Image: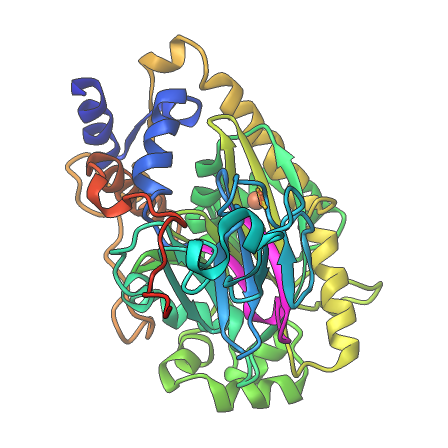
């Protein structure tokens, strides 16, 4: 315990005990105290547009069916049969009015309610012996949506999702609401990397510093024209609510010119102007910052980039959403979706998808560069020497804790939260401070009492 307190103290000073990136004890604490109660992304509403549509997603070891029921509502149901615990739905996605358990055949509607038990009368005495009324697959304890992003929390007392997101919603809109119709997704691509889940989340939150070094080759071949050292340090990092990200500084121009510079066609720009608030437009149009990568605590990240997709110098933007799903202290499953404005022209969608695949996803060039670093870091963090090393994550802070540069003023940056120009590890520290806050707080056992299908919920009329 004293050892853990020392870890959290060090993290709060921006010094990171290296072993936290590969430590089984820390991981079991993360499972219980962090993933056991944070808001976690599971799907986007556009993945289940019609009644009966479903996808199956995990929160660590827990499998959930995310379905659109016949009344149009979105459900998240624990994918375990109330009878003997078989996984009720074994497909990854599909459309079904009912789910029938493969073991003994109990069946459930797509809203979770039990409808059929084989030999109900003979084996259970019918409704009088075991009433189906009120019996449902276990719902996720908390569920919330924002811009169609579906989140669940295993904590029934989780704060409302919007409260948790806070001012990060302002930035989420750039990725997920470029028109009133919102986004549609392709994917997810899923693959596993032998790296700790926190590393990617930290990197996407604020690591502008690695781009010129790690991704040199991507610039050399001309795929990406931006990440030269001097370009990245002109951008800023911001933190608001429970998330933060990075931006690029754009060349002079107004809102339209700057959105055109990253490759948006005029008809999409018109819809952005109708959809985004004046402050959201000011960040790009007047302040000149274009949103790049970001992370929402704990393990959801976003990326917005604009590579060259054809022989010309023209660039084209893409948006991607990704989740760092932990498998263990040294393995992560990455789920990566391509996201695009529903109203975007078909040609834009096709080229934007190509842009995404060239940069990120299982075959992306940025992806390959990044992961090599993260696997290596994770390996090295397992040894005994790593237990003696505190990594320096104090960029942007002087020895006495005061900032190297003052936060940007409201005139310089119209977005909410705190923003700093140039390189700094403000966001990585925010993320790990929140991590420490979670890990320090014991879980309230009473909140997760077991329930099951034993008695009728309501009196059965005789
Ligand atoms: S375990 Fe599902 S019907 Fe028996
Ligand atoms: Fe990277």
**In the picture, residue 353 is in which quadrant?**
bottom right
Give me the residue at 74% from left, 45% from top.
Answer: 363
Give me the residue at 46% from left, 27% from top.
Answer: 329
Q: Quadrant of ligand 2?
A: top right
Seen from the viewer's position, the closer of residues 185 and 387 is 185
Q: Is residue 230 left or right of residue 153?
A: right
The extreme top residue here reads 384
Give me the residue at 40% from left, 81% from top.
Answer: 282
In the rendering, at what x and y percent does residue 154 appear? 36, 49
> In the rendered structure, does residue 55 fall within the stretch colored magenta?
yes
* The N terminus: image quadrant: top left
The extreme right residue here reads 311
Seen from the viewer's position, the closer of residues 73 and 135 is 135
- Can residue 96 be seen at all in this image of the molecule? yes
Q: Is residue 359 left or right of residue 174?
A: right
In the rendering, at what x and y percent does residue 155 appear? 30, 51
In this view, 451 is above or below 7: below
In this view, 396 is above or below 49: above
Magenta extent:
41-58
> In the rendered structure, does residue 418 fall within the stretch colored magenta?
no
* The C terminus: image quadrant: bottom left
Give me the residue at 29% from left, 55% from top.
Answer: 156
């Amino acid at each position: 315990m004293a050892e853990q307190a020392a870890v959290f103290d060090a993290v709060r000073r921006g010094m990171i005990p290296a072993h936290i990136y590969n430590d089984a004890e820390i991981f079991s604490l993360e499972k219980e105290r962090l993933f056991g109660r944070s808001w976690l992304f599971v799907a986007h509403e556009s993945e289940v547009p019609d009644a009966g549509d479903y996808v199956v997603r995990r929160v660590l070891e827990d499998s959930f069916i995310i379905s659109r029921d016949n009344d149009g509502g979105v459900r998240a149901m624990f994918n375990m049969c109330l009878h003997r615990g078989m996984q009720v739905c074994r497909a990854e996605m599909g459309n079904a009015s009912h789910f029938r358990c493969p073991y003994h055949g109990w069946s459930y509607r797509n809203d979770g309610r039990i409808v059929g038990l084989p030999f109900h009368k003979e084996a259970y005495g019918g409704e009088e012996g075991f009433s189906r009324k009120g019996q449902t697959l276990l719902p996720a304890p908390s569920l919330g949506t924002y811009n169609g992003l579906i989140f669940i929390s295993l904590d029934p007392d989780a704060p409302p999702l919007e409260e948790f997101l806070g001012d990060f919603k302002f930035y989420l809109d750039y990725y997920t609401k470029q028109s009133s119709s919102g986004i549609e997704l392709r994917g997810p691509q899923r693959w596993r990397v032998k790296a700790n889940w926190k590393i990617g989340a930290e990197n996407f939150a604020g690591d502008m510093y690695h781009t010129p070094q790690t991704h040199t080759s991507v610039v050399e071949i001309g795929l990406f024209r931006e990440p030269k050292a001097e370009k990245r340090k002109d951008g800023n990092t911001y933190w608001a609510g429970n998330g933060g990200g990075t931006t690029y500084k754009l060349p002079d121009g107004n809102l339209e010119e700057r959105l055109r510079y990253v490759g948006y066609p005029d008809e999409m720009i018109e819809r952005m102007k109708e959809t985004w608030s004046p402050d959201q437009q000011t960040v790009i149009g007047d302040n000149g910052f274009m949103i790049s990568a970001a992370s929402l605590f704990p393990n959801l990240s976003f990326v917005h980039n604009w590579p060259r997709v054809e022989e010309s110098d023209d660039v084209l933007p893409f948006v991607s959403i990704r989740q760092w799903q932990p498998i263990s202290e040294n393995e992560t499953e990455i789920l990566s979706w391509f996201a695009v404005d529903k109203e975007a022209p078909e040609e834009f969608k096709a080229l934007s998808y190509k842009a995404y695949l060239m940069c990120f996803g299982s075959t992306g060039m940025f992806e390959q560069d990044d992961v090599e670093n993260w696997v290596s870091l994770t390996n090295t963090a397992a040894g005994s020497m790593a237990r003696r090393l505190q990594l320096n994550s104090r960029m942007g802070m002087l020895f006495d804790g005061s900032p190297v540069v003052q936060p940007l003023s409201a005139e310089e940056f119209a977005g909410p939260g705190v923003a700093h120009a140039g390189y700094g590890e403000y966001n990585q520290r925010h993320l790990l401070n929140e991590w420490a806050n979670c890990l320090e707080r014991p879980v309230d056992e009473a909140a997760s009492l077991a329930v099951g299908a034993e008695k009728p919920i309501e009196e059965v009329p005789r």
